[in-house]
Structure formats: C-alpha cells, structure tokens
Image (spheres, rainbow, N blue to C red):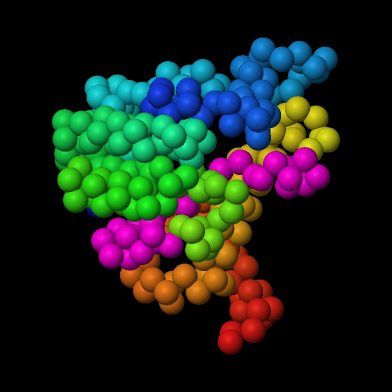
Amino acid sequence: MKIICVEEHTSDQDLLKAGQPKLMAEAKYFTEVGSYFNGNVDDGDDKLPQTINFQTSTKLLPDLDGGRLALMDEHGIDMQILSYSNPSQNAPADVQVQLTRQANDRLAEAVRANPSRFGGFACLPWGQPEAAAEELERAVKELGFVGTLLLGRPGDTFLDDARYDPVLAKLNELRVPIYLHPGYPLPQVQQPYYGGLGTEVTARLSLFGWGWHNEAGVHLLRLLLSKKFDQFPNLQVISGHWGEMVPFYLARLDDSIPQR
C-alpha cells in the first residue's frame, strides 16, 4: 500500500517575515507559546512540561531534500503533498501576489526535483480573490500542483463570504481540492473563550488543543450551510484532524438543522 501524507509543511521565510506583524497583532500568544515551550519564559513553575520544541521544527521545515527524504524512508512514507506553514493572507495586500507566486515557484522546484516523492498545494493571495483564482490556475496548470491549502480564515470572514466565490469557482472548474487547515481563532473569540488560564493552558487551548480545530470545523459547516456545494458541485474539501470535529456531530446537526 502506498502511503501519501497530505498535511506536510515547509516554510517560506519571505511569507513568514511579511506576515509576522499581523500575527503578532492578532495572536501574540502563538509566538509566546514557542518561547514558553522552549524554556525561555519563567512564570515561576519549573514543573510544567516542556514538550513542544518549535526550534527543532523550525529547523526541519525548510528541508526539501535529503533530510526530509531520509525521514520519509525511515517512517515508510512514499509521498508528501507539501504546503507552506505560513498563512499567506497575513502578508500585506500589496505584496501578497508577488510573495505567493515566488513561494509557489520555489515549492515547484522541490517537486520537480523529486516528482515521485513530492506534490504541492499552492498558497494563494487570499486578500485579492480574483488574483488568488489566477494564481491557483497557474499553480495547477503550469506548476503541476494538486490543489491549495488554506491556513485558517482567508480574511476576517470565512470562505462562504461571496467575495471568495472566484476562488471557489476556479476550484470547481479545475476539480482540485482545497485543504481547510486550522488557523488561530479570531481575536474577538480567543480571549473570552480561551484566555485567562495561564500561559501554557491558554495557548494550547487556543491553538492545537481545541481552538483552531473548532474554528476549522465551523469553517466547514459554514460552507455546507451556505449551499456552496450546491453552487459549486465539483468543489472538493479536505478536512484533517478527524474532520475537525464535524463527523462526530453529523447526527446532531441532522436532527437540529431543518433539512430544507
């Protein structure tokens, strides 16, 4: 059996640098938690677990050659569909198109160097939906990518917002999937829902413990309930992490929301 992993990240330094101010403004705890887990923050409790080493993953992410391939072989992974761990929508709007094109070109080089081991998900300039649709088409038709991955929301709203219809229409036309990857919650949500529990607990609950999975599930539900799959019948969505909670509540949803 061939094992193909579809949530396999790399990083792009230009996108990371351009998006850092927005990340710090909206989710400073995201970067603080990295320092905390690496033992750089002292809150008076030396017994808390230091189990996540962002420094290690940061060093591993850019490797798209020998080291990654060796780890894939070690763990029996035949192929990875690569994507960027940097939310491209965090970059300023005036540079998003340029930065995403450059990032996709770099990713395509890695795929071309090892086409039997790597595929690619495009990053898109979500702040400009028409340009995002154009870049998706270029990435699929010219670069050979198999779809796109979106980290979190494309902006202040979700993909059911009509302003993103050009991208959904292009996905529908090309018949390639979008991977709805979690992202940090809206700032208005994060503090009242997850804040006030201490550095470690608040950060974990806001992010990979619950918050970003809950938000990704809401994202998928909004696409379903807004009838986007009726509007775009060939739209394909990949939802990771056990479906971001949605499959476990399908019966409840069917009972609670009128089918009409």
Spot occupied by residue 121 in the image (x, y as percentages of width and height):
33, 45
The quarter of the picture where residue 62 lies is top left
Which residue is rendered at x = 65% and y = 35% of the image? 26
Which residue is rendered at x = 61% and y = 59% of the image? 218
Residue 126, above or below 18: below
Labels in figure, total: 0
Camera sees residue 227: yes
- 74 relative to 158 in the view: left or right: left
Q: Residue furthest bottom?
A: 260
Instruction: Tell which of 260 and 162 is nearer to you.
Output: 162
- 189 relative to 22 in the view: left or right: right
Spot occupied by residue 87 in the image (x, y as percentages of width and height):
48, 37
The quarter of the picture where residue 50 lies is top right
Instruction: Tell which of 75 and 108 is nearer to you.
Output: 108
Which residue is rendered at x = 65% and y = 30% of the image? 25
Q: Which residues are magenta?
A: 165-193
Instruction: Tell which of 10 and 12 is nearer to you.
Output: 12
Camera sees residue 181: no
Magenta span has 134? no
